[in-house]
Amino acid sequence: MSQRTAGSKLNKSAKRTKLMRYRVNPVLFIEEVLINPETGKPFKLLKAEKKFLRYAFKRGRNGRLLYPEQIYACPKKSGKTTFAAIYIITVVLLFGGAFAEAILAANDLDQSVGRVFTAVKRIVESSPLLRGHAKITADKIAIYGAVITAIPSNYASAAGSNQVVATFDELWAYDSERSRRLFDELVPAADAQDRLPPDGDICGIRR
């Protein structure tokens, strides 16, 4: 075995080990990899956010999430949009599997890109370990095989989607038939054991 081949195998093994470490404790991934675009420094999660994440990805013996419907509640101006963006990145990169998809739905038919997508974009652009592997367009971010897409509040735009997680800007305002159909369209298939259903305001976060 050549030194190059051996080195490649060791590198892949190290990456798998780090991935498993991050899956066991997603907080490490967030605080070691993701950079806060406002400060230029790694994120430091609140105690409440850390506690939420400890339960968010727990699974039962059958491999399904113990808590598939997740709500994170906090007062206004407490960073829910940023936390939703952090959550989305964590889901698709650590738990989404190969070719993971996330959909971020705006809260208005004429608004194609919501605040969560903008927050995701800024975090990816600010994080050195992510930005070099990301391709960013006006409404889509492709990174490490995962794709995060922003869509308007229109159920037709969500038809045929196969996302592992979906988020909604201002879910409380989804009171029309059109918006309710969008919500129903974005609920992952029942047989998708590893998929996270949308619930709450944005990414399981209720205002």
Image (cartoon, rainbow, N blue to C red):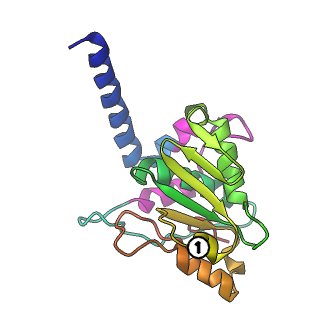
In this picture, residue 67 sits left or right of residue 186:
left
Q: Can residue 47 be spotted in the picture?
A: no
Position in image of residue 52 (x %, y %): 50, 60
**Residue found 60% across the figure and 43% down from its top:** 44
Q: Residue furthest left?
A: 1
- From the top left corner, tell me how far across and down residue 166 is, in percent: 55, 65
Residue at point 67%, 75% (across, down):
154
Camera-side residue: 11 or 152? 152
**Image x and y of residue 17, in percent:** 33, 35
- Quadrant of residue 107 within the rendered picture: bottom right
Query: Is 59 a magenta residue?
Result: no
Task: Judge from the rendering whether residue 7 lies leftward or rightward of residue 196; answer left or right.
Answer: left
Q: Which residue is mark 1?
A: 200
Q: Is residue 77 above or below residue 3?
A: below
Q: Between residues 144 and 94, which one lies in front from this camera angle?
A: 144
Q: Is 31 one of the magenta-colored residues?
A: yes
- The magenta-colored residue range is 30-57
Q: Residue at x 33, y 22 (%)?
A: 8
Residue 31 position within the rendered picture, expressed as x and y whole percent measured from the top left: 54, 40
Can residue 36 be seen here? The reply is yes
* The N terminus sits in image quarter: top left
Q: Is residue 12 positioned above or below 31 on the image?
A: above
Tell me if mark 1 has few (under 14), some (14-19) or many (20+) residues whose alpha carbon lies within 10 angstroms of its own.
many
